[in-house]
Image (cartoon, coloured by chain):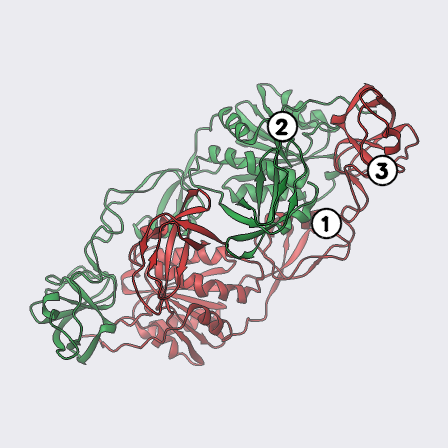
Chain colours: A red, B green
Amino acid sequence: MPDLSVKRFRYVSASDAVNITLNSFDAPPRRIKIVSIDKAFNEILAENIVVKDDVPPHNVSHFDGYAVDFRDLRDASPSNPVHLRVIGSVFPGDDEVPEIGSGEACYVATGAFIPRNANTIVPVEAVNLIDENVIEVRFPPKIGDHIISRGSDLRGGEVVFKIGRVLRAFDVGLLAFLGFEAVRVFVKPKIGVLSSGDELVSSRFTSHSLMLSYLIRRFCGCPVDLGVVRDDRSEIVDVIRKGLKGTDCIMTIGGCSRGVKDLLPDAVLSLSDSNMVLRGLKRVPGRQTSFAVVGGKPVLMLPGLCQSMVVGFYTLGVPIIKKLGGITSQLLFKFKAKVVEDFNASFMPPFERVFFVKLLGFNDLPLVHLVTGPSMHRSVLIKSNGFTVIPPFKINIKRGEIIEVTLF
Amino acid sequence: MPDLSVKRFRYVSASDAVNITLNSFDAPPRRIKIVSIDKAFNEILAENIVVKDDVPPHNVSHFDGYAVDFRDLRDASPSNPVHLRVIGSVFPGDDEVPEIGSGEACYVATGAFIPRNANTIVPVEAVNLIDENVIEVRFPPKIGDHIISRGSDLRGGEVVFKIGRVLRAFDVGLLAFLGFEAVRVFVKPKIGVLSSGDELVSSRFTSHSLMLSYLIRRFCGCPVDLGVVRDDRSEIVDVIRKGLKGTDCIMTIGGCSRGVKDLLPDAVLSLSDSNMVLRGLKRVPGRQTSFAVVGGKPVLMLPGLCQSMVVGFYTLGVPIIKKLGGITSQLLFKFKAKVVEDFNASFMPPFERVFFVKLLGFNDLPLVHLVTGPSMHRSVLIKSNGFTVIPPFKINIKRGEIIEVTLF
């Protein structure tokens, strides 16, 4: 007969839990590596990026067309077409620019520097070619038309990306454009993933570990598989002690409720230099989520039911990875959406309740359907695109009500 | 002096362009590969996944608690606490379940099968332990409390994922749970990325190629770097002919406007078995976007200015990859947002105009700021989270107006 004693929860609101958790550990000194720019996507920038020179470095043309002095065309009209002599051409990359005189034009390609004495671009679509060297213009342009001025995109000296930015496709493109061939990035925090439970030991792939690993990677952590540990206190102690040596943080799955085989919190507390910071969230699913600091490193204990694990991870796991990784970019997208049906949220004060939602389509606002089912139901997750948090003491959600949705 | 003749555009609305483009080529016979489940994230499923047996396979407990016959507790109250004898325990993975008799309870862990004759679960939090083998209950439960019934998550025989689904973290988790160790997926379509322009030949990394490659990967294509080709018609013909041999599609960057060095459309048309399907979009930036089918394979010609390239890619590149890859999952998220400032969209009928937007925060709806600048401005892209499309003939956007935003 197992020992039926249980450990009490001391539930804390999600927002308090985030603060308590993040204030309970220091981010480790960050290691920096240099990556080639073609490998920099989704990496965490470890330096401020300063633009050296103005972009563009000179005034350039926004169109393929003809650089002119607008004064030559002031009186152009369909009944008074003006002819200009084309004296040459400039293309992007040409450093030497010609000079135009009165009655003259110069062909300019998009992005090319503006010829001297020119102040206006007439797009190719707006001219008639009379012969190889003469264009006809039938409408007066405005001075400055289609000229992009020096430094209007980026100013020399400007800090364009700050430390901690997770580099996106466009960012990498800009870095390449600015001449960077490599960039300094933070080594991503190593997050140990440990599943617990006698029933999991025999399976080759652990469903929850896989899910959690992918989620960790999506939020710029580097998952480290610590395997499965059976429901045995000394084995748990052992694998966590060893696991912490090679990681910056461990996230465990299961074993943190109040059942007979819920040995994680006890085991973690028995490690030397261990401090239980959080024992329970005022949020369901996920209320069993607990957090300890062991030897200065965060240990997040996530519940074993899939929805509970996911809520615990989005509530505390994401902020922990952000802190460990030095990430300043916004990692979660939130938006408002309209609920398509009446819904009765079971009354469970003083807990917030999380519901998973499926985006249905558009009307005025995005429509969502609440996908509900017990916390262990996986079908709920696979049908959903995100989740919503319902405040404590709110019971009914009415059809047409506006809720805030966080995308997965 | 270069030849100044230009090819005319025949602009088509974006929605028509998508239809014309997608109807102009057949998806190639799809190759299938088998991937281990721990490598299946973001892969395109090549088989329908059928659930073999009900999930859960029997009624299971939703909580750590005690399985009871609710009739034993019908009269329980604080003044009439009922004692039950605990006759054993069941845990997840235990196939054998005990049977309870009158006045008896059995400990059940979350996810464990329900003991015979039990019909209700009393959570551990709701009992007092009198001694190791006796619990006290002070409130009557409702019949069926906390029992999750067989097949309530997934039904045996149910098709849980259909061909073409891009597998997410939760999906892979479910597949592992269902016992899959490997899964059949489509080989991702190979998309050749070719930058054109004399001015790009010397750079080690091509900014636009990098951006486009990352975007292709994000939408489940496999980018193949075809390098940079100079503005030379025979070189372009050569590199596209060779490139098409090893790819399912080519996306070119630059050289498709009407300028002197815009040789892409001409070069593509000169290939044997080539058909120009689209020459221009009624959408700016990106209006130069053009599309041909060469030897049955799609060739998307994207403009060279960064914003124009991005718009052309989201408008036509994403649907092309979806068709080539056999992808049925929704790849783009759209939502409504409120604009924070008055904005004058330059009048350019009959063109739609795309504006990039930055999410600012929340009020009632998500707030967005329109990030504007010439199509070659990279700063616009790096500050934005998505874009909005403004219909033709609409000039002014008012502060507080609701627009639809597509996330990058």
Of all residues, the one furthest to the left in this rendering is: B102
In this picture, residue B176 sits left or right of residue A300: left
Give the labeled residue for mark 3: A119
Can you give x and y, in whole percent of width and height, for residue B180 in the image? 32, 48
> Mark 2, mark 3: which one is toward the viewer?
3
Tell me which amino acid carries mark 3: Asn
The answer to the question of whether label 2 and label 1 lie on touching residues, with beta carbons closer than 8 A, is no
Picture disc at residue A179: 1
Residue shown at 22% from the left, 49% from the top: B54
The quadrant of the picture occupied by the N terminus of chain B is top right
Callout 1: few (<14), some (14-19), or many (20+) C-alpha neighbours within 10 Å?
some
Q: Tags 2 and 3 in contact by the CB under 8 Å rule? A: no
Q: CA distance from mark 3 to mark 1?
A: 29 Å
- The residue sitting at 12% across, 78% down in the picture is B80
Closest to the observer, B87 or A227? B87
| x and y percentages locating residue A316 in the rendered image | 45, 66
Above or below, B236 against B113 in this view is above
Judge depth for marks 3 and 1 and give the one in front. Answer: 3
Q: Amino acid at mark 2?
A: Gly
Question: Disc 2 and disc 3: Cα gap in Å?
Answer: 28 Å
Residue B140 shows in this picture: yes
Q: Secondary structure at mark 2?
A: loop
Labels 2 and 1 share a subunit: no
Say if B266 sits above or below A234 in the image: above
**Residue B280's mark?**
2
Q: Secondary structure at mark 1?
A: loop
